[in-house]
Image (spheres, rainbow, N blue to C red):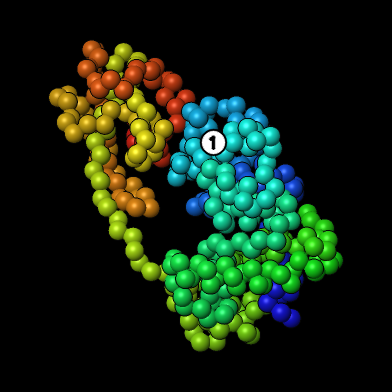
Amino acid sequence: MSFTTTILEWFKENGRALPWRETRDPYAIWLSEIILQQTRIEQGLPYWQRFMQRWPTVEALAQATEDEVLREWQGLGYYSRARNLHTAAQQIVERGGFPTTLEGIKALKGVGDYTAAAIGSIAFDLPAAVVDGNVYRVLSRYFGIDTPINTTVGKKEFTELAQDLLLPALNRIACHTPTFRWEKGKGAGLFNQAMMDFGATQCTPQNPSCPSCPLAESCVALREGRIDELPVKQKTLKVKERQLTYIYIRCNGYTAIHRRPAGDIWQGLYEPWLTDEVPQGAVLQRQRVKHVLTHRILYADFWLWETEERPQLPDDYFWIKEEEVDNYGVPRLIEILLETLNT
C-alpha cells in the first residue's frame, strides 16, 4: 500500500475519539485548535469542554470580556492565545460568520498556516495539508529528510510533500470512522487528522512504536538507524533568566494586585506587588521558585507582608478582598505562589 493509504487504514483502526471530531462546527474545531497549540490533549480537553459549556457559540464568546476569557484560560499558559481567541471571535461576529476560505481563516487573529489548514480541511473540506510537529516528525523519519524543520527551506519542503501526499486522499471512497463517513472529495480533514494522530501516538518523539508500525518496512530512518536523529532542528533560541520578587500584602482582609501591561509576559493577567525591595516585617513564604517559559527562565521569591495600614503603591495597583483573588486570572507561577499561603 502507498504511504497515504497506509496512514488512512491505520487511522480507521487507531484514531482517537475526541469531542471536536464529532462535529463539523467550525467554532468548536477552531476552539480546539487554539487550545491545543503548545498543549497536550489531556490537558486541553477540560478547557475545551469548559469553554464550550460557558460560551457554546462564537457570538457568546465575542460578548465575553477579556478578563473572563483570561480567567477561564488560567493554567494553560501562552496567554496571547486567549487574547487572540477573544479578538478573533469578535472578528467572526463582525463579518457575519465563520470564514470558509483559507485566506479568510488566516485573517483571523492568532491563526497561522497550520491552524487554517486544520480548520479549513476538517470543517469545510478544503484540500489543504497540515504541517505541525507530528507531521514533521513522521515525514522526516519515513522519507529520511534531514532539512531543518525550522528553516524557510525546510518548511517549504515539508509543506509541499504533505500536500502531495494529501492529494490521493481526496478521491478515496468508503473509509469510515466512528464519527465520520468519508465521501469522495472530502478526505482532506481525515487525512490531516490521521497524520496528527499517527505522529502523536505511533511515531512519537521518544520511544516510537516501530515494531508495530505499518510503515516500518519502508521507513528510511528505521532502516538507517536514524530515528533519534530526525527531525533536525536548528538551535537558534537564546534562553534568558529573570528574577522576580513578589509581595503579597495582607491588610485587614484586603490585598493589592495590578494587571500586567502590554509588551511583556502575561499581558492582561494579574499579579501581587512586584518590587525590588522587601518591606520590613515581610515573611518569606517561598524562595527561588523556578518557572520555565519558552524563551526564558524565571526565578521568583514570594513574601507575605501583614500590615494594618495600606502602603503607598504605584498607581496601577488596586485593592480587593482576599476572597476575591480567585476571580482574577493569574499566571501559573502566581497560582503556585498563592498556594503557599494556604500551606
Location of residue 66 with respect to 207 vertically, above or below: above
Q: Say which quarter of the image contains residue 223.
A: bottom right
Q: Where residue 106 appears, x then y in whole percent?
A: 58, 49
Residue 49 as seen in the image, left or right of residue 251:
right
Residue 255 as seen in the image, left or right of residue 327:
left
Query: Which one is nearer the viewer's eye here, 313 or 304?
Result: 313
Query: Which one is nearer the viewer's eye here, 311 or 107?
Result: 107
> Under tag 1, what secondary structure?
helix
Q: Residue at x 65, y 72 (%)?
A: 164
Amino acid marked by disc 1: Thr
Q: Can see residue 35? A: no
Could you tell me which quadrant the N terminus lies in? bottom right
Residue underneath mark 1: 87
Query: Which one is nearer the viewer's eye here, 126 or 45?
Result: 126
Q: Where residue 287 appears, x then y in whole percent?
A: 24, 40
Residue 341 as seen in the image, left or right of residue 82:
left
Query: Which one is nearer the viewer's eye here, 182 or 309?
Result: 182
Please give the count of numbered marks on the rendered protein.
Answer: 1
How packed is label 1: few (under 14 Cα within 10 Å), some, or many (20 or more)?
Answer: some
Q: Can see residue 193? A: yes
Location of residue 25 with respect to 284 vertically, above or below: below
Q: Where residue 250 appears, x then y in whole percent?
A: 30, 20
Q: Where residue 53 appears, x then y in whole percent?
A: 66, 33
Q: Residue at x 55, y 48 (%)?
A: 111
Residue 295 as seen in the image, left or right of residue 187:
left
Looking at the image, the residue that sits furthest to the left is 280
Q: Which residue is drawn at 45% across and 67% down?
A: 152
Location of residue 88 with respect to 248 vertically, above or below: below
Could you tell me which quadrant the C terminus lies in? top left
